Image (cartoon, coloured by chain):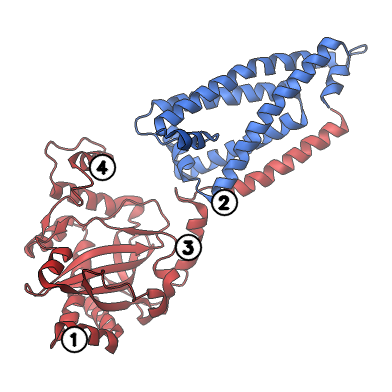
């Protein structure tokens, strides 16, 4: 081999190493694009991880969390609630926060049956979401992927949802199995609004402006929402049709999972005024830079 | 250098340039996708084909990209023509087998390994049709590897005879 050839081979070697390093830098991490994972992880570094944590299975911690959420309610929010709800707006909002805690407590239980019983005691029934979009076959295929075995004949929504909750809690060492919330006044936010035919009510309530942690922390480059299986007979749309408008609330907290994953949590609740009960309509997370299966509630 | 050997060297050079362009394009497209669009479909394809863990698929994907880049450079610079020709043929054989397997898998995504997703977009193909197109392209490229390897034998004799007294170095020189 001549000196010229040796030099050429050495140059190729250097170029290949540089190219390999560049490709490694951009290649997906945990199944997601690398830039997205790096952005999300950088955003999550803002979480005040030194704060105390409220265990989702401890009612004493629950009282502290509810107090923290209540303290996050500013007078403007209460005035908005009062304008719609009239007297007792504060009590109505506080009962919504109580419902939010009880929801999280049950949905994060080790036994999905406990959540199902709690939801069904409130008149909710398990139904496959978006029946207009996804037929029975879709859920049967998902069941087979989740459980590694064919779906039982006549797979019903409750059976699927319970299996999905178990799989969701167990995935990747409990990466999305919620265990606690951060007890830090900067890590919570509560917004009250009014949903009507024009919109969901949070159009002008940006977390970028309202929360100390900022929009990048709460939303970031990636978001995921859970599937809503246990639903009431009348959802938000039906209540708006019936009542013209609905009192809605967005509750934010920083959840920590069994594996220690920081998960900026968004919950939307609405009040069925006639029934006097709050319902959870949306559960979502921002900045979860992992290829995870979606939760079920 | 005899005229026959010179002609073989020119044909080999032309074929090598075709493969060089293809491999460098494939390598550049991977970095470009990682920077500007998404490499997630390719990562999922590697996982689907190999059943490797996330980290394993990452290592294999990066290794394959680096291998394509190295082959492209070696072909372009005409380094060790015989060895590089055999490596090119072996690589395309592996890619063809992988593509055939991908095309046979139910619900597999489009590989998008070599630009066929652009064609799929233009012709409205689904993932399976795009993978079959990729398979057809690989078969054509594999067929082109036959003259590539055969010509490399004629134009770049290596081993003891290469440096033996009286050996014609013209062909090897023509490749430098």
Q: Earlier in the sequence, mark 3 or mark 1?
A: 3
Q: Residues within 10 Å of mark 1 (few under 14, many from 20)?
A: some
Q: Residue furthest right?
A: B166
Query: Nearer the observer, disc 2 or disc 3?
Result: 2
Q: Say if mark 2 contacts mark 1, CB within 8 Å.
A: no
Query: Nearer the observer, disc 2 or disc 1?
Result: 1
User: Could you give the CA–CA distance between mark 3 and mark 1, rounded to whole angstroms?
Assistant: 39 Å
Query: Percent position (x, y) of residue B68?
Result: 63, 34
The residue that label 3 is drawn on is A41
The residue that label 4 is drawn on is A142
Res. B35 mark: 2
Q: Earlier in the sequence, mark 4 or mark 1?
A: 1
Q: Secondary structure at mark 3?
A: helix
Q: Quadrant of residue B140?
A: top right
User: Could you give the CA–CA distance between mark 4 and mark 1, rounded to whole angstroms?
Assistant: 44 Å
Q: Say if mark 2 contacts mark 3, CB within 8 Å.
A: no
- Chain letter for the residue marked with disc 3 in the picture: A
Task: Identify the image quadrant of the N terminus of chain A.
Answer: top right
């Amino acid at each position: 081999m001549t000196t010229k050839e040796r030099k050429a081979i050495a140059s190729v070697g250097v170029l290949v190493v540089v190219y390999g390093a560049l490709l490694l830098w951009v290649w997906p991490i945990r199944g997601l694009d690398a830039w997205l994972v790096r952005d999300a992880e950088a955003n999550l570094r803002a979480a005040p991880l030194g704060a105390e944590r409220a265990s989702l299975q401890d009612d004493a911690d629950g009282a502290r969390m509810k107090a923290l959420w209540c303290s996050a309610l500013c007078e403007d929010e209460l005035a908005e609630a009062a304008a719609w709800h009239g007297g007792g707006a504060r009590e109505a909002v506080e009962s919504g926060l109580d419902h939010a805690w009880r929801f999280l407590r049950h949905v994060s239980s080790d036994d999905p049956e406990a959540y199902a019983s709690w939801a069904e005691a409130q008149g909710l029934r398990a139904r496959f979401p978006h029946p207009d979009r996804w037929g029975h076959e879709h859920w049967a295929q998902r069941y087979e992927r989740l459980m590694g075995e064919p779906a039982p004949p006549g797979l019903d929504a409750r059976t699927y949802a319970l299996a999905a909750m178990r799989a969701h809690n167990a995935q990747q060492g409990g990466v999305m199995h919620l265990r606690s919330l951060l007890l830090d006044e900067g890590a919570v936010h509560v917004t009250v609004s009014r949903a009507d035919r024009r919109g969901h009510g949070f159009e002008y309530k940006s977390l970028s402006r309202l929360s100390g942690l900022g929009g990048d922390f709460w939303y970031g480059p990636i978001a995921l929402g859970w599937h809503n299986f246990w639903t009431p007979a009348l959802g938000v749309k039906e209540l708006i049709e019936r009542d013209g408008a609905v009192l809605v609330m967005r509750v934010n907290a920083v959840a920590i999972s069994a594996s220690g994953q920081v998960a900026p949590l968004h919950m939307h609740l609405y009040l069925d005024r006639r029934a006097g009960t709050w319902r959870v309509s949306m559960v979502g997370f921002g900045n979860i830079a992992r290829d995870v299966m979606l939760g079920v509630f | 250098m005899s005229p026959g050997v010179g002609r073989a060297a020119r044909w080999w050079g032309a074929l090598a340039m075709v493969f060089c362009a293809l491999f460098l394009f494939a390598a550049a497209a991977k970095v470009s996708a990682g920077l500007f669009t998404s490499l997630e479909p390719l990562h999922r394809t590697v996982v689907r084909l190999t059943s490797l863990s996330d980290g394993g698929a990452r290592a294999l994907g990066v290794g394959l990209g680096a291998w394509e880049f190295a082959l492209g450079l070696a072909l372009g610079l005409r380094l060790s023509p015989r060895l590089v020709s055999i490596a090119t043929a072996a690589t395309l054989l592996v890619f063809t087998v992988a593509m055939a397997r991908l095309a046979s898998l139910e619900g597999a995504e489009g590989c998008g390994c070599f630009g066929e997703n652009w064609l799929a977009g233009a012709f409205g193909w689904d993932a399976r049709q795009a993978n079959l197109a990729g398979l057809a392209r690989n078969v054509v490229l594999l067929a082109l590897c036959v003259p590539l390897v055969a010509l490399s034998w004629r134009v770049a004799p290596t081993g003891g005879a290469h440096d033996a007294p009286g050996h014609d170095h013209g062909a090897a020189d023509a490749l430098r």
